[in-house]
Amino acid sequence: MVGTAINARELMEQAVQVMRRSVAEPRADGKSNPLVGAALWEPDGNVETAYRDEFRDGDHAEYTLLERKKQTAKLDNAVLFVTLEPCAPGARQYPKLSCAERIVLARIKEVWVGIEDPDPTVDRRGIRYLQENGVAVNMFDLDLQREIRDANKPFLEQAIARAEAQEEGEPVEAPSLSSLERAIPSVDFRDFSSEALERYRQTANIDHPTESAVFLRRLLHLGLLEESAGGRTGPTGFGLLLFGREPRPALPQAGLLATIQLEDGREEVRDFDGPQVFAPEQALQWLRDRLPNPIDRSDARRVEVNKRLWEMVREAVVNALIHRDYSIKGAKCQLIATKDTINVMSPGEPVEPITLEQMRSLNAPMLSRNPVLHYVFSRMELAEERGLGLKSLRDGAESAGLPLPRYKWVPPYLSLTIYRNAAALAAELSGPAELERLTGDRKTVWEIASARDEITTRELIERTGYDERKIQRILADLRDDGLLQRTGNGRATRYEVCQSGGHSRPQSD
């Protein structure tokens, strides 16, 4: 962070507040414009704001701020907060500069972005352009991101449709997010699965047949096909991943490797290496057919726990396929199931600027590594429209009474462990021998406490039915054992787990 007096949260909130003053410029075509607010912090403590259409219809908030209000200012150490991703090179009609280019030319070195602009001509490319030009990028807090999305719902719903219109003017080369955006010379449209394309057409409510010119133009605009200078149209890497009958001969990093580790030491394995839009449901069905249901005291509860568990696994597999780093060619997404856990492993660290700590909190800001994949999965009702689905993982675990899933970095994998029962995490955190030593009430409290990031005395009383005196005695024992630590005082007192460990073994390719 530049400077010492800056309060990032207050400036995020200020940008959101001024965003709501944006003017809805009149448009004959009925298209919605985004509400965008910007706040610029300068080292002397001065804060200048701007919003879309503040002075003139069509002017972006960044343009108003940098070209109309601060044109002569020296902004080398200034920090910009803007509620919508700055448009990328190539997103505006030539010769207009994009907002990302204006920010770089203004020599601003740190930018906080509210949400991605989902238009495929911009999505992540404005952020990438800033990063490639030495600008540090951070994302707004998750609760403010949701507020921005709610305020911009009409714009967000229309963004993809606008991208499908033909652009006028001279094209400008936009930053590439991945080599998979380019066509693969060795494959053609016949390598797509007709079944996968038809599933996409039906779930996305597309009227035109999959071999029609209109449908093919849609795939071109989405970046799933690419037309070369010679007039040849062929699948891009992303297109082949999603819809290819056999992506792996051309893309060895494609696919999902699944393993069930049986209690007798044997393993069952299965590779899901066809169209990746089918992989999550295929893998889920394979697991359902082979794994016993979670055990609970009542049939109704067992059904609910099982339902939530599979929803979490499905979300985790989809996230792994969408957000993995496909430039790591020697690793594939992995699904490893044991009697107590289901581990989903995705090659690559969290996409910058998302951190591992934010992922572990299950409250990370929303940002897609591969927006094209995310869009298609969401249109097929396999993923949340935007974001990482972390809230779904948290809500699913809490509603089923299961431990919160846990992320860790196991190079080169971002590994997510989903626990099938409370005892599994308790054993992992304390060690099997320590868990064996805990009995009765102490074991009950430890399993409940270890399943959450933190817990209070009141929550333990509600969960166990024990009185406060008994809970306090058990908590003191668990602290003496080095399993829990106390933080805060008075009503703010919390109990947190002291230690962690263990991870699943990846399957070899």
Image (cartoon, helix red, strand yellow):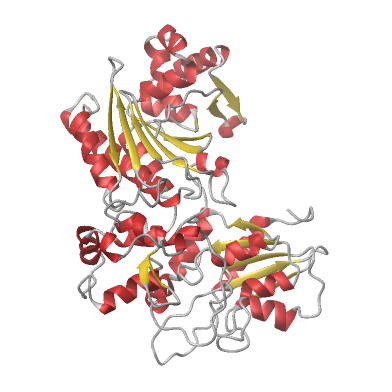
Q: Looking at the figure, which quarter contains the C terminus? A: top left
Q: Position of residue 478 (x, y in %)?
A: 51, 15
Residue at (59% x, 25% y) in the render: 486
Left or right? Give the position of 9 relative to 443.
Answer: right
Residue 134, placed above or below residue 487: below
Rendering quarter of residue 375: bottom left
Residue 196, placed above or below residue 497: below
Asked if residue 31 shows in the view, the reply is yes
Left or right? Give the position of 6 relative to 488.
Answer: right
Q: Position of residue 88 (x, y in %)?
A: 57, 72
Extreme-left residue of the structure: 299
Residue at (45% x, 77% y) in the render: 229
Rendering quarter of residue 9: bottom right
Extreme-top residue of the structure: 437
Residue at (59% x, 62% y) in the render: 128
Rendering quarter of residue 125: bottom right
Q: Nearer the viewer, residue 289 or 476?
A: 289
Q: Nearer the viewer, residue 467 or 338?
A: 338
Q: Position of residue 445 (x, y in %)?
A: 42, 20
Residue 113, placed above or below residue 48: above
Q: How many marks?
A: 0
Q: Position of residue 48 (x, y in %)?
A: 72, 72
Left or right? Give the position of 308 relative to 385.
Answer: left
Residue 420, placed above or below residue 443: below
Asked if residue 465 shows in the view, the reply is no
Left or right? Give the position of 296 relative to 109.
Answer: left
